[in-house]
Amino acid sequence: EPEVTQTPSHQVTQMGQEVILRCVPISNHLYFYWYRQILGQKVEFLVSFYNNEISEKSEIFDDQFSVERPDGSNFTLKIRSTKLEDSAMYFCASRAGESTDTQYFGPGTRLTVL
Amino acid sequence: AQSVTQLDSHVSVSEGTPVLLRCNYSSSYSPSLFWYVQHPNKGLQLLLKYTSAATLVKGINGFEAEFKKSETSFHLTKPSAHMSDAAEYFCVVSDRAGGSYIPTFGRGTSLIVHP
């Protein structure tokens, strides 16, 4: 069964460093998402992406964040200058198309900022 | 606007006994509702979803949920808990307001299963 994959599973970085989290959505899905879950808190929406552009973003998704689909398979989330409060689990998700609102999630990347 | 409330942060049951995880939602439109499960150090797995078809929805691993519009509830149940059911469960609502498919997650309910 097709699934969303994410790499790395765990990323440790120093405050102020740039990180790139990678996701491979389900093939032929058209809509892509990033969420984060700070330890012990709710899963929060960050950004949605469709047709090579951001379609929606939350207040959390400030200028420090960017997303990109550099090729036909990868979907990346970049944090330019990490802060301690960026430490969280980051989930990627994909949705097939307009006819469904079911999103399929990847296993997540745990980001630890020291 | 949409919102979801999971009424219990923790639910503890004995193996073989029924499971009830409660969820209430608020939505301005006809919502889609989902339950996801998250096992330790794993991602979010879709258990089941309601999208305006049958109000009793059957999911994987013996779970089911009933959509009750009058009570704005979508509680998750299972007749007999198994040790492997121990995990975090999230109720999610998505109502396509303004063409948006951005779902709202509940805070999660931790299911503890005792032998």
Image (cartoon, rainbow, N blue to C red):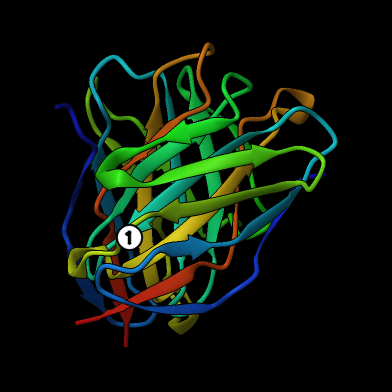
Residue reaching furthest to the bottom: A114
Chain on which label 1 sits: B
**Looking at the rendering, which quadrant does residue B64 occupy?**
top left
Instruction: Using residue B27 as the reference point, say whether residue A62 is left or right of it.
Output: left
Instruction: Using residue B8 as the reference point, say whether residue A72 is left or right of it.
Output: left
Q: Residue drawn at (24%, 37%), measured in percent from left and top?
A: A4
Q: Taking A41 as reference, is A37 above or below it?
A: above
Callout 1: 10 Å neighbours few (<14), some, many (20+)?
Answer: many
**Looking at the rendering, which quadrant does residue A30 occupy?**
top left
Q: Nearer the viewer, residue B45 or A87?
A: B45
**Looking at the rendering, which quadrant does residue B88 occupy?**
bottom left
Q: Quarter of the image containing the C terminus of chain A?
A: bottom left
Q: Residue drawn at (81%, 30%), measured in percent from left and top?
A: B29
**Residue identifier under label 1:** B38
Q: Which of A68 and B70 is in front in this view?
A: B70
Q: Where is residue B36 in the image (x, y as percent from the top left)?
A: 41, 50
Q: Quarter of the image containing the N terminus of chain A?
A: top left
Going by the numbered disc 1, the residue's amino acid type is Gln
Q: Residue drawn at (17%, 61%), measured in percent from left and top?
A: A9
Q: Where is residue B104 in the image (x, y as percent from the top left)?
A: 63, 49
Q: Residue drawn at (69%, 32%), measured in percent from left and top?
A: B31
SS class of the residue under badge 1?
strand
Q: Position of residue A104 (x, y in %)?
A: 35, 36
Q: Taking B87 as reference, is B1 above or below it?
A: above
Q: Where is residue B47 in the image (x, y as percent from the top left)?
A: 36, 43
